[in-house]
Each structure stands twice: as C-alpha cells, then as structure tokens.
Amino acid sequence: MNPLARHNPWLVVACGAFIVTLAMGVRQSFGLFLQPVGQDLGIGRDAFGFAIAVQNLLWGLAQPFVGALADRYGAGRITAAGALLYAGGLALASAAASTLDVQISLGLMVGVALSATTFVTVLGAVGRVVPPARRSLAFGLTTAGGSLGQFLVVPGAQGLILELGWRSALQVLAAAVAVMLVLGLGIAGRPAVQPGTEPEQGLGAALREAAGHGGYRLLNAGFFVCGFHLAFIGTHLPAFLTDRGLDPRIGAVCLALIGLFNIAGSYLFGVFGGRWRKKYLLSGIYTARALTIALFLAFPLSPMTAMLFAAVMGFLWLGTVPLTSGLLGQIFGVRYLSTLYGIVFLSHQIGSFFGAWMAGVIFDRTGSYDLIWWTSIGLGLFAGLVHLPIRDATLIRSPLARTAAA
C-alpha cells in the first residue's frame, strides 16, 4: 500500500495527474512534427502516420500485460520503467535519419512506454485509494491532467520546433518526460484490497467474468471509436488546416484548445458520472462528436471555425475515460481494474491505429481527408447507440466465483 494513501489519497491523485500531464502532453504534440520531420527526412504522411499508428497499436497491445503487472507489483515501478523507455524513444527520434528510425523510436519505443505511463496504470492506482463515492471525480481529475498537458506542452513544443528545430525540440521533451521517474514515487506501492470491501477473486475468474458480460464487449466497441477519433484528429488536424491555407500556428492553437477545454470536460464528466448513469453520458459524448464534425465540415473553414471546432471537440475529448473506467469499476470492482481497463484500452488503440494510419494513406492517394471525416461521423453515431443497452448493475458474485483460481 502506498504510504501517501494512508495520509491523503488525494496526494496520489495529484501525482497521477501530473504523470498523465507529462505523458499525454508530449504524446499530443507529435502531430506538430509530421511536416518538419517529413520534409527533412523525405518521408510521406503515410509513413509518419504509420509510425504514430504503430505507437497507438503497441500502446494498446502492451496495455493488458502492463495493467496486470501494475495490479501485481504496483504502478510506481511500472511507471518508472515506462518513463525511461519514453525518454529514450524521444532521444532516439531526435537523431533519426530514416523512416525506420522514426518507426522504432516514436512507434515502438514510445508506444510501449505510453502503456506504462498513462491511464491504465495511473487510474488503477487511483481507484484503489479513493472511496467509491468519490472515484468518478478522482478519475475525472486524473484524466484532466492529460488535457492540461496538451494545453501546456503543445504550444511549447511548437515554439521549440520553430526556435530550435524538431531534433532539439524532441531532446527537450525527452528531458521533461524523465521527471516522471520522481512522480512515480507518489503512486508506488503494491495493490491491496481492504478486508470486507470486495470479494476475493482470481485474475482468471475476473477475465472470464468480463468476457461473458455483454456490456464489457460493448465498451470495447465504443472505445475503438474513441481511439479512431482522437488519433485521426490529433495527428492530422494541423496538416489539414495548413493544407486549407491556414497559418501553421493555428494547428498548434487548435491542439492546445482541445487540451484546454478537455480540462473542463474531463472534470465535469467525472462529476456527472457520480450523479447520472455513465452509459447514457457516454452515448451523448459520441453522438455529440459526430454532430460537431458534421457542422465543422458544413461551414466555410476559417481560423474561427477551426478554433470553435477544437474547443467543442476538446470538451468531448477524454470525458470518455473517467466514464468508461468508472463504469468498469462500478460493474466489476477495482481489484483488477488496470487489467480489465487495459483490455478495453487495447480496443481504443486499435481504433487509434486505423485513425492515424488510414488518414495518411487516404490523403496520399486522394489528396483529401474527406472520406476519413465522414467515416468519423458514422462511427460516432454507431458508438452513441452501442452504449445504450449496457447492463451497468454491480455484479453479485457467488462464493465459488470469489475463490476461483487465477
């Protein structure tokens, strides 16, 4: 058990939020590197998009295993290892000379590192030290850290690229990421369930229980859509705006606005999740995303419409995280929350893979992002529907299920 949690669990929340701030803030800046890296190394958008797609896919593929390790050994150790790998990947990317270098560094290394330094690891640690009645709020505050990072880091990264060049910018970001080594101490400690709070259950039984729950499968489907939206917009929106004649700085401003408004969105949806049924809030978020994209395409593009779009999407950006993780804790309990959320997050990252990569492929072949925008609308409407039938009641386990072997 983390000694901080015995005195004030909100200190654990603060450390977790700062870890997510750094990890997600740096990650959200990668779209700014698409054009300078491509021009310098002579690689197309499909190649850079593929590197980010690999990053997202590996982030997801590693997540169930990293979540299980965090459930067993504690989030602090896992975060420290991820911070080292993250900093190393950025440092290697700063010396890249080919497409392969970019894919190994930003793709493979950073992808695995993100699995150890973001929501699955951190939310699992937070969920175990915060009372159930306050858990949705704590998840919202932690998730807001990712948005704060986007708001603070993205403009800074753009300034570094303009002043120092993309290689030096990546080196500075690598140094910033290394701070997570210290912050990991705040979420350290092996997980433990307090006697009487939850039935004893093996990991194998928990996985079988989730696999047989229809709502768990629907949450996986919905989170696929979330990943598709975030990776496509986060990676390609700056280039889309520049292609349409807007100043490159507008792209950085839009990414920062997404982060700024998502601070409010993540916090408020965390609060709302403690008052209203989370599945209906999730349905509303995805439907609202689809309508927002449709309106963005319907109006003439200008700096103002781009920033309005970013602000609204930002409010809807990561509100899915406290609601989805909160719904998992509500249904299945928190003993294996990192593991179960890690599997759902894998679905998110498969969606991210297709969102980042397919957009680049379609643009290079057609010269337009139109098809991806309309695909995003259709997926948003689909996700809005699939959350409605989820059975969100807390599972009552039989005595046999409580003692099932892993």
Image (cartoon, rainbow, N blue to C red):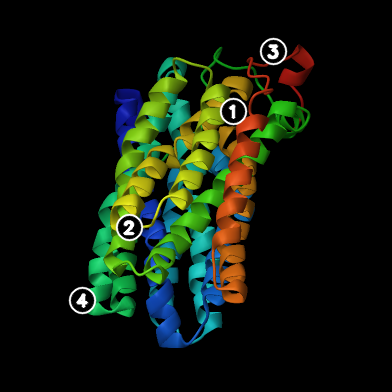
- Name the side, left or right, on which 380 lies relative to 274: right
Label disc, if present, on residue 163 of the rendered structure: 4
Real-space Cα distance between discs 3 and 1?
Answer: 14 Å
Q: Is residue 68 above or below residue 353?
A: above
Outermost residue to the left: 163
SS at circle 4: helix
Real-space Cα distance between discs 1 and 2?
Answer: 40 Å
- Dot 3 or dot 4, earlier in sequence: 4
Where residue 28 appears, x then y in whole percent? 40, 57
SS at circle 2: loop
Residue type beneath disc 3: Ile
Q: Which residue is mark 2?
A: 302
Q: Which residue is mark 1?
A: 328
Q: Nearer the viewer, mark 1 or mark 4?
A: 4
- Dot 3 or dot 1, earlier in sequence: 1
Residue drawn at point x = 59 percent, y = 65 percent: 357
Real-space Cα distance between discs 3 and 4?
Answer: 58 Å
Q: Nearer the viewer, residue 267 or 6?
A: 267
On-image quarter of the C terminus: top right
Real-space Cα distance between discs 2 and 4?
Answer: 26 Å
Q: Nearer the viewer, mark 2 or mark 4?
A: 2
